[in-house]
Image (cartoon, rainbow, N blue to C red):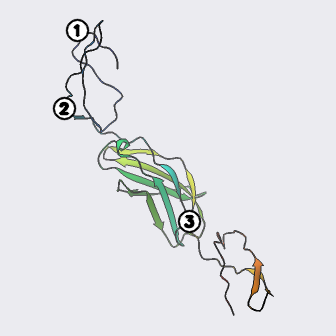
Amino acid sequence: PEVINGRTHKATVVDLSPWVEYEFRVVASNSVGIGEPSRPSALLKTKAAVPVVAPTNISGGGGSRSELVITWEPVSEELQNGEGFGYIIMFRPLGSASWTKAAVASVESSKYVYRNESITPLSPFEVKVGVYNDEGEGTLSSISIIYSGEDEPQIAPVGVSALSVSAAEVEVSWQPLAWNRHTGRVLGYEVSLG
């Protein structure tokens, strides 16, 4: 801390965080050294301010058909800067000009799910997540690209063949499905006996 002239009995403390409780102590010093600190002052809370730290780790995806799932890392309490803290979610289909905006009023929230039957599977969306409190809207994150939920695969595997290996075993093979908008991410195959 800055050393204050011995004839001064008041100081302004700067660069404090908004909406945080502080207590203060004062120590006297001279050419011999530094004395004992004073007893702590009463707790004093700084005034609220618009939040300035945007959520991080914006991601999402997955979910069901016709859903856009958006997730983020929640903002810690000391960075919320006031009462009434929440999140602003903004998203639009990639290439669209207008944003859809939603608010999530829960401090602990880290997920938002938008459901709309018009969303086609695996559609890319531009997404930003911001913050607000009773003082106003704060900072928005940079844009992340998140894909809407998938649909079940619409294409069956081709090139299915079977080879008898033994009296009790048959080896079944097929051509894997390539990733595309109709199949999405193939997580596995089911082989059924007919």
How many angstroms separate mark 1 from mark 2 (CA)? 24 Å
The answer to whether 156 appears left or right of 46 in the picture is right
Q: Position of residue 136 (x, y in %)?
A: 35, 45
Q: Quadrant of the N terminus?
A: top left
Q: Label 2 amino acid?
A: Ala
How many angstroms separate mark 3 from mark 2 (CA)? 52 Å
Circle 3 sits on which residue? 148
Is residue 1 placed above or below 183 in the rendered structure?
A: above
Q: Label 3 amino acid?
A: Ser
Say which of marks 3 and 2 sits in front: 2
Is residue 175 placed above or below 141 in the rendered structure?
A: below
Q: Position of residue 51 (x, y in %)?
A: 38, 42
- Labels 3 and 2: the sequence-earlier one: 2
The answer to whether 151 appears left or right of 33 in the picture is right
> Residue 42 got which mark?
2
Q: Quadrant of the C terminus?
A: bottom right
- Identify which residue is drawn at 49% across, 70% down: 116
Circle 1 sits on which residue? 7
For this rendering, which residue is in front, 113 or 160?
A: 160
Q: Are marks 1 and 2 in contact (CB under 8 Å)?
A: no
